[in-house]
Amino acid sequence: MKELLDNLRIYPRIDREDMYSKIFNMPSDIEYVLKAMEYLKLPEKIVVKGKSIEYGRPNNVVICGMGGSAIGGIILKDLLWELTSIPIEVVRDYVPPSYIDEKSLVILVSYSGNTEETLNCLLYSLKSGAMLYMITSNGALLKVAEKHSIPHYRVPKGYPPRAAIIHLTLPSLYIISKLLDMPIYLEQLRDTVKLLRKLRTSIAREVPFEENIAKVSAMKLLNKIPIIYSYRPYRGIGYRLKTQFNENCKILAFFEEVPEMNHNGIMGWESTTQYSKTLKVVIIRGSKESTEIHHRLKFLEELLESRGVEYLNIRSSSKFLIGETFELIMLLDMITYYLSIARGVDPTPVPIIEELKRYLSTTTGTLSRIQAELESF
């Protein structure tokens, strides 16, 4: 199996839609967004169906999105946890919180622009008078944005939503920072570009197995069910890894947060001998690890060893949070990429999700109803 991942001829046969290039394009994606943000100007106000929406400092931020389009909001919440005094809520549902009003900033994120849950949140947000910002590549979301001059970032086409992570995260960071008069950390983002380009040289397909941490880690996860643990400010990264195992590798995976899992989930390891060989724990760690969390994880490692359960510690080499965040995302994405190749599975298609969308279109008709209602605005 080791030889498989060093055989460069197999990659185009399995990775038919070239997920590899999309992962490796992250540094250039950061540069693209930074350039685009130079030209962004927020209006003082816009008028939607006779209602004036004025832009200023918000009292709260609500980020609405689903799947790969929501991950950026979850990661952003971790990044800004200690930097802002206003609440940030991530909504992965049909309805935003009832408190949104003209002092709320609602960011609506949908790569396709036709995600029915996000469009339904848009309906509520339009009626609330909230400040709006949209991130999309096309669809009904873009139509509404252009029709009413709602500020928006247009994501380049050609990505699966989960691979557009940079485009779906950094514009929100920029808008929130601008409205709250916070530093945007441009220099740290430029340093992150250098960091990711350096990382690429060690995890590329051409790097031999024994020297490639992403390949080695992937093989340790082959034929295993991943159990992922992480803690603030890496919770969003842990959750994203779970979803990358699901979508890229087409396998089940599970995620829990420390210290919360110490109060419930840890009891699941009480009697695991009959299936311990089928599990592999992945612990995501970074420079923000407190003494308390360190000792909780030390206890967990000793517990896993006593139960015969193997685990991996995945760390970033960066010492600043934005750099850590995107370095871990890129490394973990490549681990799931190599695992998909080892399993002989094309990482890009998500056939069951597409099947569900077709089923819903013929049974509920919700998306068509929402799109029709948006036409009236």
Image (cartoon, helix red, strand yellow):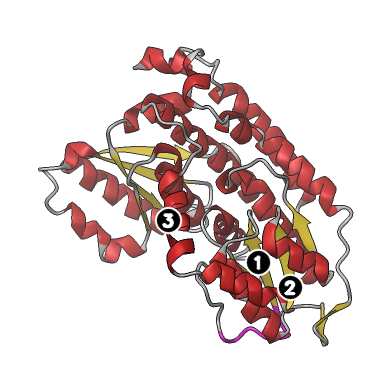
Please tell me whether mark 3 or mark 2 is closer to you in this view: 3
Magenta part of the chain: 98-104
| Residue that numbered label 1 is attached to | 108
Marks 2 & 1, CB-CB < 8 Å contact: yes
Type of residue at label 1? Answer: Leu
Q: Which residue sits at x=45%, y=39%?
A: 248
Where disc 3 sits, the SS reads helix
Q: Residues within 10 Å of mark 1 (few under 14, many from 20)?
A: many
Give the percent coordinates (x, y) of residue 61.
65, 73
Marks 3 and 2, Cα distance to the nearest angstrom? 29 Å
| Residue that numbered label 2 is attached to | 132
Look at the picture and state if 95 lies above or below 340: below
> Which of 84/67 is in front?
67
On the rendered structure, is 83 left or right of 368? right
Type of residue at label 3? Answer: Leu
Mark yes or no: residue 320 visible: no
Please tell me whether mark 3 or mark 1 is closer to you in this view: 3
Q: Which mark is residue 356?
A: 3
Give the percent coordinates (x, y) of residue 327.
59, 39
Type of residue at label 2? Answer: Leu
Disc with the residue nearer the chain's start (3 vs 1): 1
Q: Which residue sits at x=31%, y=38%?
A: 311
Give the percent coordinates (x, y) of residue 209.
44, 17
